[in-house]
Structure formats: C-alpha cells, structure tokens
Amino acid sequence: MEQKFYTLLVYSENVAGILNQVTAVFTRRQVNIESLNVSASSIKGVHKYTITCWSDADQIERITKQIEKKIDIIKANYYTDDQLFIHEVALYKISTPVLLDNPEVSRVIRRHDARMMEVNPKYSTVLLAGLTEDIADLYHQLNGFNCLLQYSRSGRIAVTRSFEEPVTDFLKEQDDN
C-alpha cells in the first residue's frame, strides 16, 4: 500500500497517562510518530493532540479507531495536509562571525521571512514560523553555509478547515443524549 503523510487530531479529557496510551497504539503497530504537539483546545477541559506520521490508509484508519476506543479519548480523526491549516516554528542558532562574513547568510534568512531574535558576538538566534518544507529548506541552506550551531523545531500545529473543532458536534450529541 502507498504511504501518505497523515495528521491525527485527538481530543481527550485532561487526565494523566493519556499520552502514553495514545503513543502505545503507534508503537504496537510499529508506526513512527514524526511530530507530536499537545495543548489545551478551544473547548474548556478538552486537550488536543496533533500527531503526524507516515502510514497507509487502512493502517491509519485502524490506528484512529483504536485510539478512539480508549476510555478518556473523546474523539480522534485523521487528515491529509489539504484538509488542514498547518504551521510549525523553528529556532536556529547560527555563528555570528559567519553571518557577518557572508552576506548570503543574511539574504537567505530574509528570503524565508525569518526573524532575528538575538545577535551577540558569538551567535545569533533566528526564528521561523511556517510550513514544514520552509523550515526544512532554511535548515538545509544554513547548514550549507556551515554556520548552524543548534536547531530545534516544534511539532506541527493544525486546525481543520471546518468552522468548528471536529469534536464540537460530537460533544453536542453527547449533551443531547
């Protein structure tokens, strides 16, 4: 089967141990999680897990159903990139001497619409918020200048293209019952 990149949005109550239960589903199926972000959602008392992975359609459906069976999970859905608004953040620590000696480094940073957060004599910190591809491209270009000292990237954050959180309708149905 063809492997595609999927994003799972999982909603749960704020209970200790849920993250372990969710990641265990991936481990048992030997699917590597590419990124993971956990935060409060727009609904009070509900947390949102944004998980990305490579999988085929049958396997991602099975994973999603298995996650949804967990007691404290409210709802789980999987999406392809065209169904979501996606963003990531990255920090790059680069050598200030290389930055000052090579004007092309500064041009690359500006072309990516990245922000200089700090500049001191030893290192400079650059922030880029955007799509995964843009973040990876800046990483490769800075690495090519041999100026990259440290690099860190957030997990993906995503919202659906629908009007409300996908879990909203589900919660309304539960309240009506």
Image: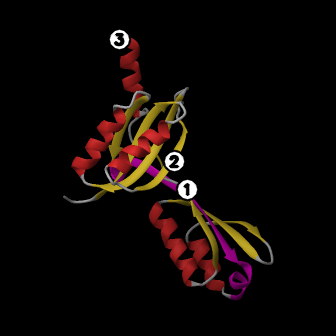
**41 inside magenta stretch:** no
On residue 1, the disc is: none
Residue drawn 40% across and 19% down? 172
Q: In which quarter of the image is the N terminus?
A: bottom left
- Asked whether the residues under the numbered discs 1 and 3 touch, taking CB atoms below 8 Å apart as contact, a structural biologist would say no
Residue 11: x percent and y percent?
44, 34
- Give 17 or 171, whichever is nearer the viewer: 17
**Image height of 33 relative to 152, above or below:** above
How far apart in space, not on screen, are marks 3 and 2 (Cα)? 32 Å
Which residue is outermost to the bottom? Answer: 101
Q: In which image quadrant can residue 24 be found? A: top left
On residue 37, the disc is: 2
Mark 3, other Cα within 10 Å: few <14 / some 14–19 / many ≥20: few
- Asked whether the residues under the numbered discs 1 and 2 touch, taking CB atoms below 8 Å apart as contact, a structural biologist would say yes
Left or right of residue 50, residue 16 in this image? right
Upstream in sequence: badge 3 or badge 2: 2
Looking at the picture, which amino acid does disc 3 mark?
A: Asn
Circle 3 residue: 177
Looking at the picture, which amino acid does disc 1 mark?
A: Ser
**90 inside magenta stretch:** yes
- Give 127 or 76, whichever is nearer the viewer: 76
Q: Give the range drawn in magenta.
A: 80-101
